[in-house]
Image: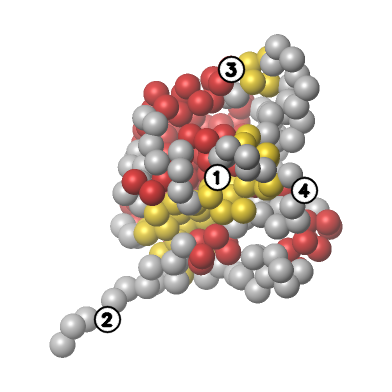
Amino acid sequence: MASPKSPTVGLVLSSGAVLGAAHAGVLRAVEEAGIEVSVVTGSSAGALIGGAWAAGTGSERITGRLLRAQWADFGSAAIAPRLGLLDTTPMVRNIEEMLGDLLIEDLPTRFGAVVTELRSTTPRLVDSGSLTAAVRASSAVPGLFPPVRLEAGGALCVDGAVLSPSPVWAAHRLGAERVIAVGFGRGNARWRRWFESRPDHPAHGRTADLAVTIDTAGHSSWSAAGVPDLIDRGYRATREALENWS
């Protein structure tokens, strides 16, 4: 008699700018626990780190890159800052140096980055095409980084966190049957909660099977000084939460 098939596990990594460095510790804890993750989704920083992991980059290498990272690795002053103060060419260069110019559909683990299309009231899941472009769009903080057009004639896209900072729905859409969602315990803005409560929002009615909340008290979303501690907090919080996972 064949043994029952294990449910497909999805891992959701939330937005958080520099706080997202904690996701490297999360990944280490998941690796150590031996959990087979088949689907990874994320917004903003969660898309950046989740995309690297889905591409086969281990948590140790991701941690090393984060510990060496500087703001200049993500953006430089834009010559004509009409749509964003920073040019994200350095981010593109660093992603491609680390991962190559990969297509999302070719990754060893199924992955989706969540973006926000300008003039749309629902988030969009990007699960095909250039990994670099999808991550760049998902991380395009409005006003700071310029929006990204993912396909010719398509809508301009910005940070997925605008409408879906913790895209549990995206993991379900990609086939996850059980979902681990990682976040930072910060309350959603009232307008975002209103969007997510609407029946036409993909987050409506979707919850995680295990929520990992990382305490980021004392750390700024925009200062790299606390990255080592954030990574450690992510590891410890996830290891503790996974004690209840079976």
Disc on res. 4: 2
- Taking 92 as reference, is 80 above or below it? above
Position in image of residue 116 (x %, y %): 68, 47
The residue labelled by disc 1 is 46
Q: Nearer the viewer, residue 179 or 198?
A: 198
Quadrant location of the C terminus in the rendered image: bottom left
Q: Which residue is mark 4?
A: 119
Residue at x 73% of width, y 63% of height: 196
**The label number, if any, that marks residue 72 in the structure image:** 3
For numbered disc 2, what is the local secondary structure? loop
Q: CA distance from mark 3 to mark 2?
A: 49 Å
Left or right for 124, reference 102: right
In three-dimensional space, the C-alpha distance between marks 2 and 4, rounded to whole angstroms, equals 45 Å
Lower sequence index among marks 3 and 4: 3
Secondary structure under tag 4 reads loop
Question: Compared to 210, does 131 lie above or below?
Answer: above
Q: Position of residue 74 (x, y in %)?
A: 58, 24
